[in-house]
Image (cartoon, rainbow, N blue to C red):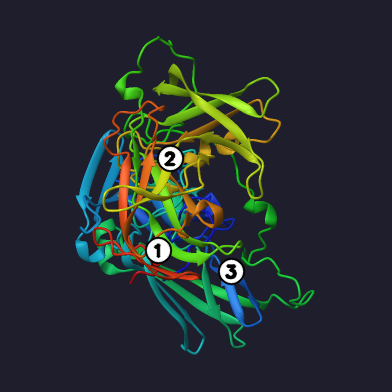
Amino acid sequence: MVKPRTRTRQLVSAGIGLVAAALVLTTTVTANSGPASGATGKGTLKLVAAADTVQVEAWEGTAYFQPSVWLAAYDAAFEFRASHAAYDEPVKLTKTVIRGKKRTTTTAPASIVDGMKGFKDGLRVTLKTKSGKVVLDDTRPLCPGGYDRQRVQTDGATGPVYPEFCGGNWFTKGVLYGIERGMAVPAVSDLEFETKGETRLTMTMSVSKAVADFLGLPNASRTAKQDLVIVDGCAEGGCETEGEMGIMAAHGADDDQGARTVVPRETLEGGENGRGRLPLGGALGIIKPGKPKKDTLPDLVSLPAWQISTEVDESGTDRLNFAANEWNAGPAPMVVEGFRRGTSAVMDAYQMFYRDGKQVGVKRTGTMEFHEAPEHNHWHFLDFAKYELVDAKDKVVSTSGKQSWCLAPTDPVDLTVPGATLRPSQTGLQSACGEKSALWLRETMPTGWGDTYNQAQTQAFDLSKVKNGTYRIKVTVNPDGNLYERTRSNNVSYRTITIGGKAGARTVKVPPYQGVDTETWWGEEE
């Protein structure tokens, strides 16, 4: 069994690494691969290279680089939805080509679907020496989405709309990713290979025939080649300090080309109303008294506990560690704002309600307190969830020390539900936790997203008085009903476990949940 890691406070991007600054110029891509502006037909995806030659740094026999090869969308947006009705059912993947108001959807053959990660074995990368010796032959999933994006048409999308990743975790129900019209995403995030004195290699990157056929890539745009010039990254200054690992275009691109530009966001051409927009903001709506309308409410759902293990904490107490996630099925975002109560370390909390980006309601919903402790030192919203270890009769035998939260979206659970926010990092999350001097803060759970906390040490269950046997981890979101939501029928989840061992060496067995084994790390289950 794998011991849980520390509490996760970042977005999950399984199967996709963060892409370093891209070195592609729009004129380079458009000159080689498509028109710079204007509609030319039904829309096309192409695999394009930004440079004929790139320089790769090797550090003590290992080279790391981000190939400047892109998957570009011309004259149409390409949207992909991956979802399954139950965890033990196969994932269904669809492609929708969006041209103006026309949307054409096709379903991918099951043989090329790699769960939520994209297309199975969709991309092959080979590295060869001048004599034809193979240095690397790597096949990996193809994710038609990703962290960095480049414009390839002057009349294309002016900014990103789709998420920055493909994939999710064990309990992800659906993801949505894609390429905006007139933009390009990296074909692969990064590559690593061992070097044995080579100074020049040829890289060939190709999309598999089955995947290329489904995506509609022209035959001439299914493969891209680049020459790699290998240089010693330790030559200047030695390897005692870690150098910058990345690529530089052989024509002399400088670091300034890596600067990221803030661009206005937009909805998808022909897409659903508001898809990809900020869920909050705009002019103040008419705030009416009384119960909020149903279309302005979130739907809070608890997921079963996962990554469960035992340990002895720093004080010598036997503990049961676990991770838990509560998410919002929508259709509206869950928004809670805190306003400082005088000079005390307490804020009065209010739930805000929105329709079409306008605030249309507000209700008092509790308090926020400043949590002054190691690894915290920020504001927490009280009573968002409750964690209990219960027996077969639902009698509580131990409780978690976690009673307050700094809420933020860490995991996509279902980005295919109505109202899902695709890029929550652009909604102003810097106010979620707040400094001690804060007068105000906003904590939000966008539709389609959940917040994962790993419970360990004093926040984990105390097993000192818990006998060996079968129990359930009970997770309850909105336990006191203080938050307005569409229904509370899905607020409780259970995960069955069996506890054994003896004091100082307790054990736990965790059966799969609906066919899902959560006790291996995501991506290592095969």
> Residue 240's spot in the image, x, y percent?
76, 75
Do the numbered discs 2 and 1 sit on residues whose CB atoms are within 8 Å?
Answer: no
Q: Secondary structure at mark 1?
A: loop
Which residue position is annotated with label 2? 385
Which residue position is annotated with label 1? 522
Q: Nearer the viewer, residue 184 or 237?
A: 237
- Name the amino acid, label 3: Val
Looking at this rendering, what residue extends furthest in the right direction?
A: 237
The mark closer to the camera, 2 or 3, is 2
Q: Quadrant of the C terminus?
A: bottom left
- Name the amino acid, label 2: Ala
Q: Is residue 197 left or right of residue 188?
A: right
- Mark 1 vs 3, N-terminal side: 3
Which residue position is annotated with label 3? 54
Q: Secondary structure at mark 3?
A: strand
Do the numbered discs 1 and 3 sit on residues whose CB atoms are within 8 Å?
Answer: no
Q: CA distance from mark 1 to mark 3?
A: 33 Å
- Mark 2 vs 3, N-terminal side: 3
